Amino acid sequence: MTENQSLVGVDFKEGYIAIIDKPLEWTSTDVVRKIKYALQHRLGYKKIKIGHAGTLDPLATGVLIVCIGKATKMVNELQAEEKEYVADIELGATTPSYDLEHPIDKYYPTDHITREKIEQALRDLSGERLQAPPIYSAKKVEGVRAYEFARAGEEVELKKALINIYEMEILSFEMPHLKIRVRCSKGTYIRSLANEIGIALDSGAHLTGLRRTRSGGFTVENAHNLENFMEKLRECETK
């Protein structure tokens, strides 16, 4: 669907895939909930199914695939496709959540870091390997979200997941700011990757910005601003 294409006449129950540019500080569930409310209470789809194919953290923006109606059967398939991100990373400091959700807890030396060392670190971290999720994540341990243990100050060991980082490149570097493009498999935590880059550089690092630019064949250039999409739904209501 393009920016000017109408949704009038669409049978959402039969299936529709909405590509949304998720706003900053919104959860992926917030986006789903907002669209579902409009479909149920304004367009009369009382029992409509809706879900997203791949969570984005609240502090991330970009491609969020929202499956509606019969398209929810495609969630697992769409979620399994490779992703592409642009990540902003600050070198020389860490946070408990590996991003800006929490304040910096420790500073590290950076005088020894060069562009060549960063390129080597990216090469070393590429390919198929195991990665540990951040402790401040929604991963469940014995039915409890990991971030609940973290907030309670309890230590818990999270199972590492098999991921594949297909490609990474430096987009810009001016100490302590690093911007990279990452092409990776489902399940890759870019927050964890930022932390791993810091460790590989004998320093520290954390994520300061993240944008998902592609998920499978869907790109951010073709994604809809959420409010624009909601306006398209309101147009359906008046027809």
Image (spheres, rainbow, N blue to C red):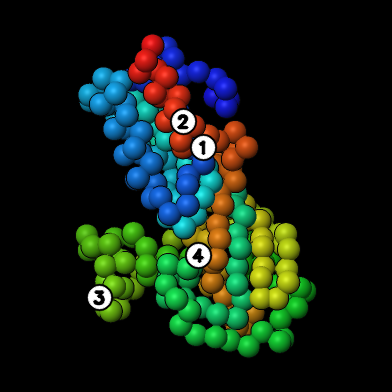
**Residue type for callout 1:** Asn
Q: Amino acid at mark 4?
A: Arg
Find residue 34 and report its image quarter: top left
Q: Tell me if I can see residue 128 in this picture.
A: no
Q: Is 183 drawn above or below residue 139 in the view shown? A: above
Task: Say which of 199 and 29 sits in front.
Answer: 29
Mark 3 or mark 2, earlier in chain: 3
Q: Residue at x 56, y 61 (%)?
A: 209
Specify few, some or many for label 4: CA neighbours under 10 Å numbering under 14, 14-19, or 20 or more. Answer: many
Describe the element under mark 4 as helix, strand or loop.
Answer: helix
Seen from the viewer's position, the closer of residues 21 and 118 is 21
Q: Residue at x 51, y 78 (%)?
A: 94
- Expressed as whole percent of the image width and height from the top left, the position of residue 76 reads 40, 39
Q: Which corner quadrant holds the N terminus?
A: top right
Instruction: Judge from the rendering whether residue 27 lies leftward or rightward of residue 184; answer left or right.
Output: left
Question: Which mark, residue 169?
Answer: none
Secondary structure category for the residue under label 2: helix
Residue depicted at 31% across the width and 73% down the height: 150
Residue 185 vertical position relative to residue 113 in the rendered view, above or below: above
Q: Amino acid at mark 2?
A: Phe
Per the image, the residue denoted by label 2 is 229
